[in-house]
Image (cartoon, coloured by chain):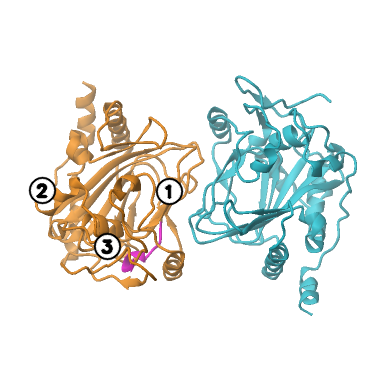
Chain colours: A cyan, B orange
Amino acid sequence: MKDLYPSRIKGMPAILERKDPIIHSSNKGDGPLSEVELDFYEDNGYLFMSNFFSEDEVTLLQQELSRNMNDNKASNEKHVVRETGGEEIRSVFDVHNNDEFFHDLSSHERLVHIAQQLLGSQVYINQSRINLKPGFKGKDFYWHSDFETWHMEDGMPNMRAVSCSIILTDNYSYNGPLLLIPGSHRYFVQCVGETPENHFEQSLKMQNLGVPDHDSINWLLSKGGKIDSATGPAGSVLFFESNTMHGSNSNISPLPRSNVFFVFNSVENKLVEPFANIPARPEFIANRTNVKPVEPKQMDLKKKKISIQS
Amino acid sequence: MKDLYPSRIKGMPAILERKDPIIHSSNKGDGPLSEVELDFYEDNGYLFMSNFFSEDEVTLLQQELSRNMNDNKASNEKHVVRETGGEEIRSVFDVHNNDEFFHDLSSHERLVHIAQQLLGSQVYINQSRINLKPGFKGKDFYWHSDFETWHMEDGMPNMRAVSCSIILTDNYSYNGPLLLIPGSHRYFVQCVGETPENHFEQSLKMQNLGVPDHDSINWLLSKGGKIDSATGPAGSVLFFESNTMHGSNSNISPLPRSNVFFVFNSVENKLVEPFANIPARPEFIANRTNVKPVEPKQMDLKKKKISIQS
């Protein structure tokens, strides 16, 4: 397969034009997002929806997040990631596969319909995780395009995926919210370097490779005109395009940040061999052939709550 | 001298009531700050004045900052602090003593009159520095009260000092602005630990001792109700009380942050022996007896500019 977006190169990195559509639906009137919302996403590369979930729903989601982390307390499985040098769980990966509640949440009708509208096809979950970022010591996360990593390390051929972050704690400007450069999804920033074997395990804790250079970030910022912060109340949802340049500052504030994170990929954008010359992560090899389209389901988060308490 | 604010203790730290006034003038109508401004400072522990300096003045101040850093490029003197593991200058200390322009700036009439109004006496500069914080890699700086350090390590007896930060680059929420907890200046947060000899040299690069515990920060936040960010355009000036709890997050954005920093102390609050059982920094021993009250001077920053260019 032709590599539309070469990266991890030797020598000077270039900035390439995006070769894929941003909104893949031919008929924009079909889905839950309005034309104004679609235009915002197309122009900026993200869409922040305040109060997507109600307060009651947020309470339940938070309870389920704690319940899941508690279930995994003693786990030494690979999908449980702990703080560097500590026992506290920071993230649990693959929750759409290994947790019933979060499997159901990944099929949430309105979320899935939005993903389908943006990607113009049926969708599957390429990866998922829940994150619990404590206050006082949240580390920063440098600028990156997820697509650069997914393309080079996991073999995602095209820009036809969208990340959905369900925000479960209030995000203020000072507790390390996601920062995004508007319009950056229109350009592919090549990164310098080569990917060593088994890089991905380290990259969960520290971003080393696939790091864009300063000049490219400056250029994107001069095009986009500003940095946007994904701030808003718990229950908000952020959709952001696979190639949108983003990162976050540290969090010395006492206020933690938790979220649930689903990556929807088009079933027409199945993974292939990684474009970097490295072995694929085993859990992504299945996503080359055996993808299960998500069936959108109505989910009554209040009913769920009662059934859990009984 | 009785230690009103014991810290660096063994065992559980406590939160003590402030024992000093916040505004030390008996006659509040005397100075440049209005009653509304004084009330804000008294309630919150800081006052942010947007556009204190004009655009032209900011340009000159920035030029002088670069000129000073350039003058110090090859210096191996102690007052020049470089990036950890790098050659770039991060800060130049003591600029009110070793640089004519910044000596004059430290006597800037309106700044000095504000300091005098807040501290209710003549004032002297207890310390000063210029900071050049580059974009992309600005590190966070954990919560601290300057007074705790100045009291324990430098022998400042009372809370009768004020920091003045002249902001020379636009401060956005996302490029690591100073964060402050409103009302925190009313409480003294004891810190655990003992101060090793020569701690101060390391503390310029990394805050280790004098670190408040999480519970105390949570308590201050619950009292203050919020975290405030010192955001605003270049040319703004922030005055903050010696005991106001503050810190800053990291800065992954490309936008640097530069400022000039003067600490005004009351001539009636001269330094004594450090309250921690450590030797004082040599440069502060002189501030026990030999303090020179600042003579407020009119300073025409535009005229200066012309004389430099000629």
Label 3 sits on a secondary structure element that is: helix
Residue B126 percent across, percent down from the top left: 20, 50
The answer to whether residue A205 shows anywhere in this view is yes
Instruction: Indicate left or right for A167 with B135 as reference.
Output: right
Label 1 sits on a secondary structure element that is: loop
The question of residue B285 being in magenta is answered with no
Q: Earlier in the sequence, mark 3 or mark 2?
A: 3
Q: Amino acid at mark 2?
A: Lys
Whether callout 1 and callout 2 share a subunit is answered: yes
Label 3 or label 1, whichever lies nearer to me, is: 1
Residue A301 percent across, percent down from the top left: 77, 68
Residue B44 percent across, percent down from the top left: 35, 64
Label 1 or label 2, whichever lies nearer to me, is: 2
Q: Are marks 1 and 2 in contact (CB under 8 Å)?
A: no
Residue at 42% across, 34% down: B85
Distance CA(mark 3)–CA(mark 1): 23 Å
Q: Which residue is mark 2?
A: B292
Which chain does the residue under circle 2 lie in?
Answer: B
> Alpha-carbon neighbours of circle 2 within 10 Å: few (<14), some, or many (≥20)?
few
Query: Which quarter of the rendering shows the C terminus of chain B?
Result: top left
Whether callout 3 and callout 2 share a subunit is answered: yes
Label 2 sits on a secondary structure element that is: loop
Q: Which residue is mark 1?
A: B177
State the residue in front, B300 or A160: A160
Snapshot quadrant of residue B266: bottom left
Q: Amino acid at mark 1?
A: Pro
- Highlighted range, magenta: B180-189
Q: Which residue is mark 3?
A: B38
Distance CA(mark 1)–CA(mark 2): 32 Å
